[in-house]
Amino acid sequence: MRSDRVDWVDYGKGICIIFVVMMHSVLGYHAFTGQEGWMGHVVDFAKPFRMPDFFLIAGLFLSRSIDGPWRQYIDRKVIHFAYFYILWLALQTLVFEADQILSDPGAVGLIFLKQLVFPASSLWFIHQLIVFYLITRLIRNVPVAGVFAGAALLHIVYYTWAQQTGGPENHAVFTGWSVTDRIANWYVFFFSGYAFAPFVFRLARFMADRWGAAMTTLLVWALANGALVWAGWSELPGISLALGFAGAFAIVSVASLLVHFRTGDFVRYAGQHSIVIYLSFYIPMRIAQKGLAATGIIPDVGTASALVLVVAVAAPLIFHRLIRNTPLIALYERPAAFRLTPRKKATLNSGSLGDVGAS
């Protein structure tokens, strides 16, 4: 293991990015075929904690930079992610609206511009990170207990409202803007990663040192999470908050155990390059979905969905390795021309989504 990285964080990000890609891969393939497969049950199981854990881990290292100069903070937390969001949104728009580019380029341009304010593509997480970094910087001197209580209350109110208006996946039902709805939904987890990072790191060490107890705890959690999902109670106000944190801590525990047993190197590698996967999984995923659905070469929907997931995760990593010594690396590494401050030395968990991936 490399000494300049926090290994369990890499594993945690790897698990998170795989679950996120899994959701898009499986549900997208279900939509293509009009059928559902066994992978859908895995997606349902992960739903209560998939995004809470992603946001919690993204905030873990923010305390290292939140009090730095504004110029440096804007460069590494706003311009950094804005560069990738705009670049990849443009690429996705060109690919998926190719049939309209010649016939109605103005409409394509409007689609692109609208998503700068109303993010609807798979890239929304990067857009939301910018918002969360700015909010947290601005309220950094507000008492932690007050912010946490307010964010938790917002989450509960959001889910209470969403239950009456189409469910929590129907963004913009609460405020009319998906960005503010996602603040209500997810900010409590991002802020907790930032504010309670010492606790999270202690939990990781505790679970690694007591792996027997950790595995027992994880079994109990998995049974409880699965039961609540199966009963249809996982999105009830309050329960959704509890399951989000329980699942996030479960993923931290699993990541620590993977480090302890020195296994799952692919998961760690995916976590190290989570931004590579997140930025570029969508295009190979859609190609795989359309190809498998059109040919029917794999009749089992669950197995075909799993193959789409493998392609969507592996293709970006392979592509990244092929171009890392070429000018195309600008797809994943921000060029000096788009920086306000010199590039920070690549230490800790850089190259992945989250605070230290923002250098």
Image: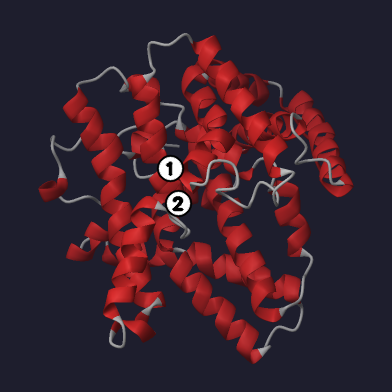
User: Front-most of 266 and 222?
Assistant: 222
Q: Is residue 8 visible?
A: no
Q: Is residue 90 left or right of residue 251?
A: left
Q: Quadrant of residue 154?
A: top right
Q: Are marks 1 and 2 in contact (CB under 8 Å)?
A: yes
- 116 relative to 57, above or below: below
Coloring basis for residues: secondary structure
- 178 relative to 24, above or below: above
- 230 relative to 4, above or below: below
Q: Which residue is mark 1?
A: 128
Q: Which residue is mark 2?
A: 124
User: Front-most of 12 and 353?
Assistant: 353
Which quadrant, please, contains the C terminus?
A: top left
Q: Residue flagged by tag 2: what amino acid is it?
A: Trp
Q: Residue flagged by tag 1: what amino acid is it?
A: Gln
Disc 2 secondary structure class: helix
Q: x%, y% of residue 289?
A: 58, 77
- Which residue is depicted at the point 37% across and 67% down? 111
Calculate the distance from the C-alpha at mark 1 to the C-alpha at mark 2: 6 Å
- Which residue is depicted at the point 31% across and 82% down? 104
Q: x%, y% of residue 177?
A: 48, 46
Mark 2 burial class by Cα count in 10 Å: few <14, some 14-19, many 20+: some
Mark 1 burial class by Cα count in 10 Å: few <14, some 14-19, many 20+: many
Q: x%, y% of residue 258?
A: 61, 38
Q: Quadrant of residue 156?
A: top right
User: Front-most of 78 and 194?
Assistant: 78
Q: Quadrant of residue 315?
A: bottom left
